[in-house]
Structures are given as C-alpha cells and as structure tokens.
C-alpha cells in the first residue's frame, strides 16, 4: 500500500513539472501572437493567440486536477472542452463582424509557423509520456496533438507554396 502511494506521489510530481513547463511555453506564445494579432488586426493571429491562451488555461486546470479524484479530473476535462468551444465562438463572432463591416487590405503574413511548430513540438514531447496516465492527462494530450497536427499542416502548405500565405488586414 505504501509503495502504491509513493508511485502515485511520484507520478503527480512528474505531471506537475510537465504541466508547468507546457503552461509557460503556451503563455509566452499567447503573449507573442496576441501582440502580433493586435498589430496586424488579424483574426487568424487572434485565433492562434486565443488557442495558446486556452491551452495555458487548460494546463493550469490540469495542474489543479493532478492528484485529485476521477470526478474532479472528468469535470476539469469537460470544462476544458467548454473553454475551447467558447474561444471558437468568440473568433467566429469577430469574423462575422468583419464580414459585415469589411475594410481590408492584404499584408504579408507574419510567418509564425516555425515558432509555433517548435513550441508545440516541445510541448508534445513533454506530454507524450503522460498520454495514457489518466483522463486529465489524456485530454491534455489529445487537445495538444490536434493543435500540433494543424501546425504541421500549415508548415507543409507553406513549404508547398514556398512563401508565407498573404493575410487580410481588416480594421
């Protein structure tokens, strides 16, 4: 029994260290991309920054759930899904507003994919060993793996076209 408690405590420490690291990475990416989104008045960058903020918040919630019971972990996983939906709806409202009130000009895109790929790659490697441990860490892994796939697809498209894809600046 004592051995099992020690294993659980060790697992919790490893999960906490990993979650703190990925939380810090995503918080830095949020600030960087949010500043670029404001500067470029870009819905795409705003969406990316909110994704990183949502990730940072979910890592914070996951940090809270480490070492707690299954009910808490399941509730946190459900809440994290709700945050992602709320962020998506917020971006959808902004895009709808810009469709109804267009004032656009085309800019060269800030090529954030290499930075996003590096940050997400590090997070993915850190989270990989925790992906099957419990519902809390599994939900973190699944959400992050989907984000990483999207970034890889963007990088592939950029490589295919050989340049940054232009984006519209709308005020």
Image (cartoon, rainbow, N blue to C red):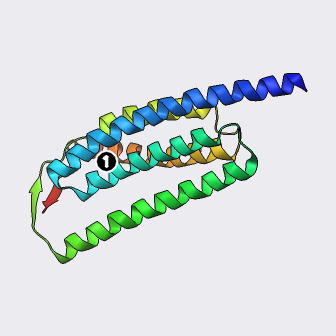
> In this image, 71 relative to 57: left or right?
right
| Residue on which disc 1 sits | 157
> Residue 86 location in percent, x, y?
44, 63
Q: Is residue 12 above or below residue 164?
A: above
> In this image, 149 relative to 7: left or right?
left
> In this image, 1 relative to 78: left or right?
right
Q: Residue at x 88, y 23 (%)?
A: 2
Q: Residue at x 75, y 45 (%)?
A: 69
Q: Residue at x 31, y 48 (%)?
A: 157
> In this image, 88 relative to 77: left or right?
left
Quadrant that contains the N terminus: top right
> Residue 106 location in percent, x, y?
10, 57
Where residue 26 sits, quadrant-wise, is top left
Q: Residue at x 65, y 38 (%)?
A: 66
**Pick the front one: 100 or 107:** 100
Q: How many marks?
A: 1
Report whether residue 146 is seen. Answer: yes
Instruction: Report the residue that reaches farthest toward the right.
Output: 1
**Pick the front one: 148 or 86:** 86
Quadrant that contains the C terminus: bottom left
Where residue 164 sits, quadrant-wise, is top left
> Residue 44 location in percent, x, y?
27, 55
Instruction: Report the residue that reaches farthest toward the bottom.
Output: 100
Report whether residue 165 is seen. Answer: no
SS under mark 1: helix
> Residue 38 location in percent, x, y?
19, 51
**Pick the front one: 146 or 16:** 16
Mark 1 Cα within 10 Å, few/some/many (few <14, many 20+)?
A: some
């Amino acid at each position: 029994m004592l051995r099992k408690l020690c294993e659980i405590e060790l697992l919790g420490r490893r999960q906490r260290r990993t979650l703190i690291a990925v939380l810090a990475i995503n918080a830095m990416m949020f600030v960087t991309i949010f500043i670029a989104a404001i500067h470029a008045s870009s819905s795409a960058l705003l969406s990316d920054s909110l994704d990183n903020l949502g990730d940072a918040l979910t890592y914070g919630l996951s940090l809270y759930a480490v070492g707690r019971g299954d009910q808490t972990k399941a509730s946190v996983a459900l809440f994290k899904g709700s945050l992602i939906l709320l962020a998506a709806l917020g971006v959808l409202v902004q895009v709808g507003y810009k469709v109804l009130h267009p004032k656009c000009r085309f800019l060269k895109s800030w090529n954030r994919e290499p930075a996003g790929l590096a940050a997400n790659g590090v997070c993915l490697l850190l989270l990989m060993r925790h992906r099957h441990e419990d519902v809390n860490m599994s939900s973190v892994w699944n959400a992050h793996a989907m984000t990483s796939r999207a970034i890889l697809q963007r990088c592939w498209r950029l490589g295919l076209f050989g340049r940054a894809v232009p984006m519209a600046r709308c005020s």
